[in-house]
Image (cartoon, grey):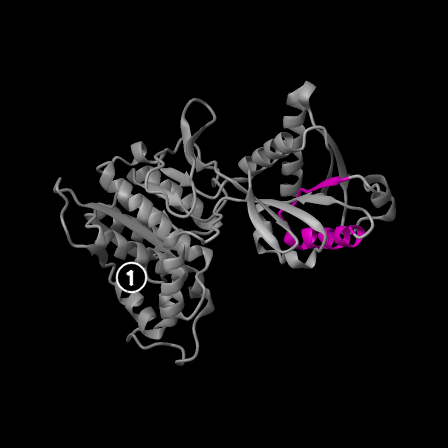
């Protein structure tokens, strides 16, 4: 692992292009950059010496390095297919070069598209740079638009809170018509917003509105709330309208206890539920959404898992697959569309692992940004997780 990390260090600190050095029939090479948080300056001293012992590894670097692992495997695949592409890797957490200087370097090098594993506080900077340099930035991780407006050079892949609320509402309306819904919530910025989405959509539906009962719960369900919302022999449907997994865990734990007496109980949650241990909530049917669901049963996923296990002695995380899928997909599209980034964003070609539905978001007849509107809905029950339509 240390040798591999050193290789990444040499590539990033030198800002070297990692690419298949071939030329396609059209004679056009395209350039793509990847920004990922590697914290290499913390891992290595000025002389290139490793700051940790052979058995230690900087934890802050792991997510960004996993994303890079996927990117590097995608580069190998593109190379094998003779795709004329140069890929530049930038350490977004470099202490020597900030994101702005790195972005300017990418622009000078002729980069046409940037895929960024970024944080919330980096969105504004990346969006402004994308607009000023007219280079499309794909925000691969943060479910937030950064309050971007009038910027067709910014793409949000992880659907925003408004999109999540709207699609969860639409899913419930389609699959549970006429069902009484008990919506559990509390005071809070995101909680208030999610509730407003449900209330606004339900009011607009009028004749087809759902039966939604909003119940404010601080930390625990009272006996009165249980008695009012659970009836023996009748199915119950709850929505936990919060992104806070600690809050969701407390409510799910209580509902699981009640589920021994009142069943069946179905609970709809948020995309953050991907980090919960569902095995704790026995007897409940749990449903939540996820934009990057990959059951890892296809040939490409199995090959990556096998390779990663043999080389890294670990199971690849979602970030490995995301890094691979995005660079493979958009690397091909840059070649296919000859660098016409706006024209290729909504293409469904070169799908790897999961579908994307990238659409323009407009408030006043101008494209404010592009957003992936695709959400998978997953159901967990009795130890099994599967996609549901």
Q: Is residue 349 above or below residue 251?
A: above
Residue 342: horizontal and vertical position, in percent?
Answer: 31, 33
Tally of numbered discs: 1
Tell me the quarter of the image containing the N terminus: bottom left
Image point (43%, 22%), residue name: 365
Q: Is residue 163 above or below residue 311?
A: above
Q: Is residue 381 above or below residue 195?
A: below
> In front: 116, or 295?
295
Image point (56%, 48%), residue name: 386
Q: What is the crowding at mark 1: few (fewer than 14 residues within 10 Å), some, or many (at least 20)?
A: many
Left or right: residue 387 compared with residue 82: right
Left or right: residue 280 compared with residue 329: right
Q: Is residue 245 magenta?
A: yes
Label 1, on which residue? 12
Q: Which residues are magenta?
A: 235-259
Residue 259: horizontal and vertical position, in percent?
Answer: 78, 50
Q: Is residue 123 magenta?
A: no
Residue 174: horizontal and vertical position, in percent?
Answer: 61, 30
Q: Which quarter of the figure has residue 348? A: top left
């Amino acid at each position: 692992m240390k040798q591999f990390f050193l290789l990444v260090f040499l590539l990033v600190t030198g800002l070297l292009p990692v690419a298949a050095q071939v030329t396609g029939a059209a004679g056009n090479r395209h350039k793509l950059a990847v920004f990922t948080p590697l914290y290499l300056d913390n891992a290595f001293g000025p002389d290139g010496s490793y700051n940790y012992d052979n058995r230690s590894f900087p934890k802050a670097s792991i997510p960004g390095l996993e994303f890079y692992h996927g990117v590097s495997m995608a580069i190998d695949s593109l190379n094998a297919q003779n795709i004329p592409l140069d890929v530049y890797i930038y350490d977004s957490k470099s202490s020597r070069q900030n994101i702005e200087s790195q972005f300017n370097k990418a622009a000078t090098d002729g980069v046409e598209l940037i895929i960024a594993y970024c944080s919330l506080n980096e969105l504004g900077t990346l969006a402004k740079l994308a607009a000023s340099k007219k280079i499309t930035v794909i925000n691969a991780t943060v479910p937030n638009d950064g309050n971007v407006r009038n910027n067709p050079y910014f793409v949000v892949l992880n659907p925003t809170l408004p999109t999540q609320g709207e699609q969860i509402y639409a899913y419930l309306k389609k699959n549970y018509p006429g069902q009484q819904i008990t919506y559990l919530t509390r005071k809070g910025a995101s909680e208030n917003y999610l509730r407003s989405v449900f209330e606004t959509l339900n009011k607009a539906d009028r004749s087809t509105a759902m039966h939604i009962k909003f119940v404010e719960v601080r930390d625990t369900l009272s006996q009165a709330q249980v008695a009012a919302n659970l009836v023996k022999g009748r199915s119950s449907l709850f929505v936990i309208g919060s992104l806070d997994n600690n809050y969701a865990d407390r409510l799910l734990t209580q509902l699981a206890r009640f589920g021994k007496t009142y069943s069946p109980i179905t609970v709809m949650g948020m995309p953050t539920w991907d980090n919960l241990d569902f095995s704790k909530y026995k007897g409940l049917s749990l449903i939540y959404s996820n934009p990057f669901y990959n059951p890892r049963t296809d040939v490409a996923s199995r090959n990556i898992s096998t390779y990663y296990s043999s080389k890294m002695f670990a199971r690849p995380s979602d970030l490995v697959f995301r890094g691979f899928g995005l660079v493979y997909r958009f690397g091909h599209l840059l070649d296919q569309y000859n660098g016409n980034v706006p024209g290729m964003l909504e293409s469904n070609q070169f799908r790897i692992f999961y579908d994307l539905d990238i659409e323009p978001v407009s408030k006043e007849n101008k494209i404010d940004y592009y957003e992936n509107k695709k959400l998978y809905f997953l159901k967990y029950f009795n130890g099994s997780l599967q996609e549901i339509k």
